[in-house]
Image (spheres, grey):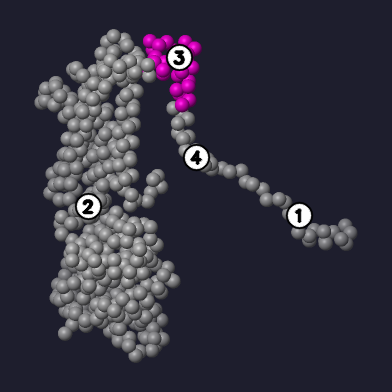
């Protein structure tokens, strides 16, 4: 049984990013990091799973759980909604009480009435995390969510994401180009190259320095 | 040269006290600084009038505007005409604004609407408002409906154009977000589209209100029997320059007041924005 099943997924764009027959399964609660060079198709795959790749053409099968949440590279908060309203956006009425709790979980209790522009970049991304969590997703899709943050904030966000994903156990697909981030967070690392899955490595038990060397070699860096 | 000269030249140069550089920027602005220009103009005008250099038949003294204005208020003429003018401008602005917003949404949110409406509006935009008055007279007669229609057309364009371009400028990233959050059409409209277009609409409303006052001035000089414009036209026939002056001052105050009111509303409605101007 899997939370996500992808078979022979192909996508073409006029601009960039191509998928050329991707097969991937993600188990419930499994944290998968998706590595790849720029233009390898990482974001294309994630956008296909999120269902927002309207401009793409392609074939293949995707089976997904009903509740999916997406975190983008930018926090993507609506600037005209206060923090709490951003978290509850589109939420059914009976789920509203959970929003304050979700904000507390990401360490932003008391900031419910703030405007997004009053928060730092890291805080905004934490609101985005709360907005995702409050939906109780079975699958969390994250597209380089920490790419725009400074190094120290990124480390804090790694801890937060790890804690929260251990507590709520969604299946996670984290798109990143940061090998250390992938090793620090994921149970399993898959790598895309030229629109195909080029590697699929379990992180548990592997020595991180050896893993790092292997991944760098596969990315063609070392 | 003696043997000590080497030692002397090796000593560090003597220190000079820190020198304050001449500031090249314009300096800190004063809060009411922008009143200086109008104040000086008023002073110049007052001095010319008081010394008799300015013939009151050319332009009455500034205080004449106040005394004549007070007199017109006592007679009840100013309020009555002002009420008529304000009602005309307001109904024109309301009709034009409603049409502007409606058509902007139709053409901004649907492809077909855009193809049909926007092209026509852009075409019409090139025709000056004064040029359509003869047709307005033909269609609506010379009574109130024509006046309101001309004002509505004048107010329509800026409101349509600003609202439409604000709708078109809504960030696609927010549309993607709305899709991933599973928002319905109505919810998307309410939480993303309308708040996103609001700044553009308010800007258009400011331009639209100004356009409405301008159109009012024009239509009130065409066969009107009431209103500030009528009061001014009548005064011109009797060479009452002081009443004409009061009319101008009232127009200026109305335009200024309307703009201020909309800016105030803007401030209240757009508290989420962090801008330079504030």
Q: Looking at this view, name the residue that lies furthest to the top.
A: B238
Residue occupied by mark 3: B49
State the residue at coordinates (25%, 35%).
Answer: B208
The magenta span reads B39-65
User: What separation in Å lies between label 1 and label 2 (alpha carbons)?
Assistant: 67 Å
State the residue at coordinates (49%, 38%).
Answer: B30
State the residue at coordinates (46%, 26%).
Answer: B39
Q: Is residue B28 left or right of residue B152?
A: right
Q: Which mark is residue B29?
A: 4
Labels 3 and 1 positioned on one and the same chain = yes
- Looking at the figure, which quarter contains the C terminus of chain A? bottom left
**Which tag, 2 or 4, sits closer to the chain's start?**
4
User: What separation in Å lies between label 3 and label 4 (alpha carbons)?
Assistant: 32 Å
Residue occupied by mark 2: B193
* Label 2 element class: helix
B78 up-or-down from A215: above or below: above
Chain designation of label 1:
B
**Which tag, 3 or 1, sits closer to the chain's start?**
1
């Amino acid at each position: 049984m899997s939370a996500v099943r992808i078979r022979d997924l192909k996508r073409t764009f006029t601009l960039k990013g191509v998928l050329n027959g991707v097969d991937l399964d993600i188990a419930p609660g499994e944290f998968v990091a998706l590595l790849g060079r720029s233009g390898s198709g990482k974001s294309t795959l994630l956008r296909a799973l999120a269902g927002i790749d309207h401009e793409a053409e392609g074939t293949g099968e995707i089976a997904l759980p009903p509740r999916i949440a997406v975190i983008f590279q930018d926090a993507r908060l609506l600037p005209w909604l206060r923090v709490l309203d951003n978290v509850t956006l589109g939420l059914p009425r009976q789920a509203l009480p959970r929003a304050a709790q979700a904000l507390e979980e990401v360490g932003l209790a008391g900031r419910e009435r703030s405007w997004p522009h009053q928060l730092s970049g890291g805080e905004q991304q934490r609101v985005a995390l709360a907005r995702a969590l409050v939906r109780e997703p079975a699958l969390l899709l994250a597209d380089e969510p920490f790419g725009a943050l400074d190094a120290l904030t990124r480390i804090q966000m790694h801890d937060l994401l790890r804690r929260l994903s251990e507590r709520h156990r969604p299946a996670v697909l984290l798109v990143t180009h940061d090998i250390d981030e992938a090793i620090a967070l994921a149970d399993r690392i898959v790598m895309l190259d030229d629109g195909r899955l080029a590697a699929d490595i379990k992180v548990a038990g592997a020595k991180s320095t050896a893993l790092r060397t292997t991944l760098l070699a596969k990315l063609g860096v070392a | 040269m003696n043997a000590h000269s080497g030692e002397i030249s090796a000593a560090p140069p003597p220190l000079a006290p820190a020198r304050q550089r001449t500031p090249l920027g314009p300096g800190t602005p004063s809060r009411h600084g922008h009143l200086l220009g109008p104040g000086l103009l008023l002073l110049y005008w007052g001095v010319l009038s008081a010394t008799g250099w300015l013939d009151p038949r050319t332009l009455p003294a500034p205080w004449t505007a106040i005394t004549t204005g007070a007199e017109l208020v006592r007679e009840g003429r100013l309020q009555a005409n002002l009420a008529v003018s304000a009602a005309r401008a307001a109904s024109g602005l309301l009709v034009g604004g409603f049409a502007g917003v409606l058509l902007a949404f139709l053409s901004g949110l649907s492809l077909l609407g855009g193809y049909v409406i926007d092209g026509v509006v852009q075409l019409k935009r090139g025709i000056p408002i004064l040029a359509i008055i003869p047709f307005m007279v033909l269609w609506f007669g010379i009574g109130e409906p024509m006046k309101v229609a001309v004002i509505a057309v004048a107010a329509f364009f800026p409101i349509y154009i600003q609202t439409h371009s604000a709708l078109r400028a809504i960030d696609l990233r927010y549309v993607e977000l709305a899709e991933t959050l599973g928002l319905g059409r109505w919810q998307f409209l309410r939480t993303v589209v309308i708040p996103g277009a609001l700044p553009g609409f308010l800007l258009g409303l400011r331009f639209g209100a100004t356009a409405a006052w301008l159109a009012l001035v024009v239509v009130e000089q065409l066969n009107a029997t009431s209103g500030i414009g009528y009061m001014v036209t009548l005064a011109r026939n009797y060479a009452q320059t002081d009443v004409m002056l009061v009319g101008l001052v009232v127009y200026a105050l109305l335009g200024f007041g309307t703009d201020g009111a909309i800016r105030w509303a803007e401030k209240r409605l757009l508290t989420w924005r962090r801008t330079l101007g504030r």
